[in-house]
Structure formats: C-alpha cells, structure tokens
Amino acid sequence: MPWWGWMIFGALLLGSELLGVDAAFYLVFIGVAAALTGLIEVAGLELEPWLQWITFSVLALASMAIFRKKLYQKLRGDGIGYDASPTGDTIKLEEALQPGEKGRVSYRGTDWTVLNAGSNVVEKGASIQISGIDGLTLKINDSNES
C-alpha cells in the first residue's frame, strides 16, 4: 500500500473512534499504527507489502499492550474518587415498564437495558432510583412499594 493509503486508513480509524464509534480506545492505537507505517514509507524505507502489514500489526499490538490501559483509565475516569457503581443514581424512563419488563434508557452517555424488578408499573417519564445492577442491566424498584 502506498504511504498515503496508510495515512488515510489511519485518519479514518482515528476519526471514527473520536467522532462516533466508542471502541474503548482500540481504534486510536490501530489508527496511530497505520499512520506510523505510512510515515515509515514517507521516510524512504520502501517495505514490501507483506512487511508493511507485519509492521502495522506489531505497532498496533505493542502500543495497545503498553499504553492503552493507562491512557484509557486516565481519560475515562477510573481514578481516585471515581464511583463506578450506579446504585442510588436517578434515571428518567423513556417508556412505561410493567413489572419484570425490560426497556432501554440513556444513562452516563450510553444506552442501557433497564429491568423493572418491582411489582408496580413504572410510568413513562418517571424519575426513579437504580436499586442494583446485573451485568449490563440496571435494576429499578418503584419506591412506593411497601
């Protein structure tokens, strides 16, 4: 692949991660590896296509293994004072939920599955506290229950 192909590939990967796709920072490192492979070609080291792909793969895997976890934690907030548990937070339902029924809700910048674990209907637009979490499902109970 010519150097400009690597640069375009890297820019597309970086742009997609930064502008729309939340791939947990993997596309950033793959995009940087593509750009670095393009820069190696610009620097005058004309590599065979198979060697370009090996260089790209090694750069992507090595940078992810070395830098991703630390950088992701710093940028996404896995530091001191960060409360990862959503229990007790209030969410606003976008649809009515019958007891035992699941639905979708926007919470902390992403869509979650929400389960009405109570015995009462929770109406659309109701603000209700999260009572627990099971994997990627937020559990709610109607606070009017006895």
Image (tube, grey):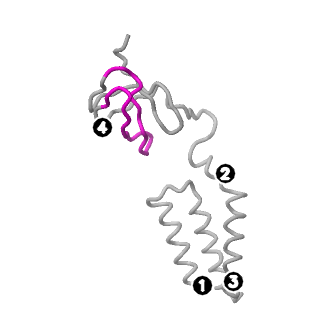
Residue bearing mark 4 = 94
- Separation of residues labelled 3 and 1 (CA atoms): 14 Å
Residue at screen point 34% across, 15% down:
144
Element class at badge 1: helix
Element class at badge 4: loop
Specify whether 40 is left or right of 15. Answer: right
- Separation of residues labelled 1 and 4 (CA atoms): 48 Å
- Label 2 neighbourhood size at 10 Å, few (<14), some (14-19), many (20+)? few
User: Are the residues tagged 2 and 4 within 8 Å (C-beta)?
Assistant: no
In the rendered structure, which disc, 2 or 3, sits on the residue that comes first in sequence?
3
In the rendered structure, which disc, 3 or 1, sits on the residue that comes first in sequence?
1
Q: Horizontal and vertical percent for residue 78? A: 61, 41
Residue at screen point 32% across, 34% down:
93
Q: Horizontal and vertical percent for residue 9? A: 54, 75
Q: What range is drawn magenta here? A: 97-120
Residue bearing mark 1 = 3
Residue 118 counted in the magenta span: yes
- Separation of residues labelled 2 and 3 (CA atoms): 29 Å
User: Are the residues tagged 2 and 3 within 8 Å (C-beta)?
Assistant: no
